[in-house]
Amino acid sequence: MTSEIIKEKKFQTKAFLLMPVMFNVGILLGPVLGGVLQDPMRSFPGAFGPGSRLGREEGVAWMLRYPYALPNLVNGFLLLMALVLVVLVLEETHIDRRHLSDPGLRIGQAIGRAFRCKRSRHKYSPLQIEENSNLVQDEMQPLPTMKEKKTPRQRLPLSRILQPNVLATFLAHGLITGHIGAFQNLWFLFLSTPRFDPAHPDPPGYKPHPPLFFQGGLGLSPATIGTVIGTIGAMGLLLQFGIYSWTTSKLGPLYTYRYALILFPIAYGLAPFLALVPTKSEAPHAADGLWIWVAIGSLLLVIVAGRTLALPSSLILINNCAPHPSVLSTIHGIAQSVSAGSRTLGPLIFSTLYGEGLKRGVVGMAWWILMVEAFVACAASWLVHDGSGNEIELDEE
């Protein structure tokens, strides 16, 4: 929809930046909201605990039985509100369907008029002379007897839509979203995996032999992991407003995309070595101290910089690879399907590899295989070029 609203290329870098910005806002606020609302009887004893107004003598029973239900209920409510806004407010942008009647939009407009009428019931605003004359002219003109029929547009067959650049863009996009989704899953697993304790090795009798054969994660608590997740969102917001526009103005979206993808394999290759960074506390206690947080922050900076530069540029290239404006929705629909499939398969495959690596005493196995995939995605990006978005002319044009 963004691509059908923003027609000029010079505004695309700012327009396509909005969705990643909102994504990072969600990453920043989501863990905070979840942390505050989990176990509400303990977090807000005065409101939900025993003896409170809502909880009475024993507290709110369902919150006691399901301490993690409230964050999910709030999340479901927010999703429901998003659905309501989409139905009542969002306008169709597709060139072949924007003229069709939209019952949801009409209901939303009626609700808006009702609120405006209540607010301005006792207010008077004079009618402008120009508006008055236009109304008189409209009344004098005869009403049309029948609606003008819209001639159907020529539809491009799928064989003409799937140009070589389109296929290359989909391939690169699928690989990128796959390894980014897998990273998020691996990152949470790695942060929560207990540290390797030489006194109680797992598997039994295991002896590490760095730099390849070593074991264990960082053993962080859920609260600390939430802080790390929030840090990702904060970094993303700062980098998006700080470097993305400047970089794309210097390099353009295509080379910004290509160079940003180089950062991912570097970060994935180094990630498991966080388990070897010296810490203040010995295993089995969670990793802590200055050096481990410097290492985590540096790694996240590389990851977030790559994602901040690559994902908005990827959206622009997907938009521009469309051979004709009339198939933008088809192109973005296929891209979303490719992205959804890779985001589903990536975490599934690499979490399995991570578990297998722990069994074999090689915690970095999944990370280094992910590094190889990121290299392949980086290579695939050099098959992509920045299209014009209108490479095919239809007969009626």
Image (cartoon, rainbow, N blue to C red):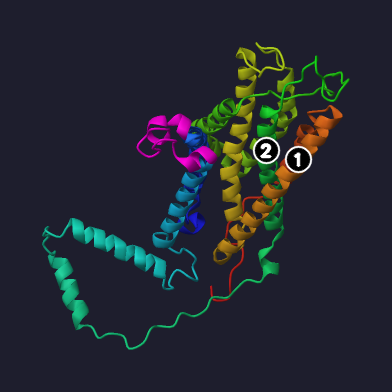
Local crowd at mark 2 within 10 Å, few (<14), some, or many (≥20)? some
**Residue drawn at (69%, 55%) of the image:** 165
Q: Quadrant of residue 132?
A: bottom left
Residue 104 sits above or below residue 83 on the image: below
Residue 63: image location, x then y, percent: 49, 40
Which comes sooner in the sequence, label 1 or label 2? 2
**Which residue in the structure is indicated by mark 2?**
185
- Taking the magenta stretch, the answer to whether it contains residue 54 is yes
Q: Amino acid at mark 1?
A: Phe
**Residue drawn at (46%, 54%) of the image:** 80
> Which span is picked out in magenta?
41-68
Residue found at the very far bottom of the displayed protein: 145
Q: Nearer the viewer, residue 209 or 33?
A: 33
**Which residue in the structure is indicated by mark 1?**
350
**Residue drawn at (70%, 68%) of the image:** 159
Q: Amino acid at mark 2?
A: Asn
Residue 42 sits above or below residue 75 on the image: above
Locate residue 288 relative to residue 211 in the image: left or right.
Answer: left
Count of marks, rendered view: 2
Locate residue 15 relative to residue 308 in the image: left or right.
Answer: left
**Circles 1 and 2 in contact, beta carbons < 8 Å:** yes
- Taking the magenta stretch, the answer to whether it contains residue 370 is no
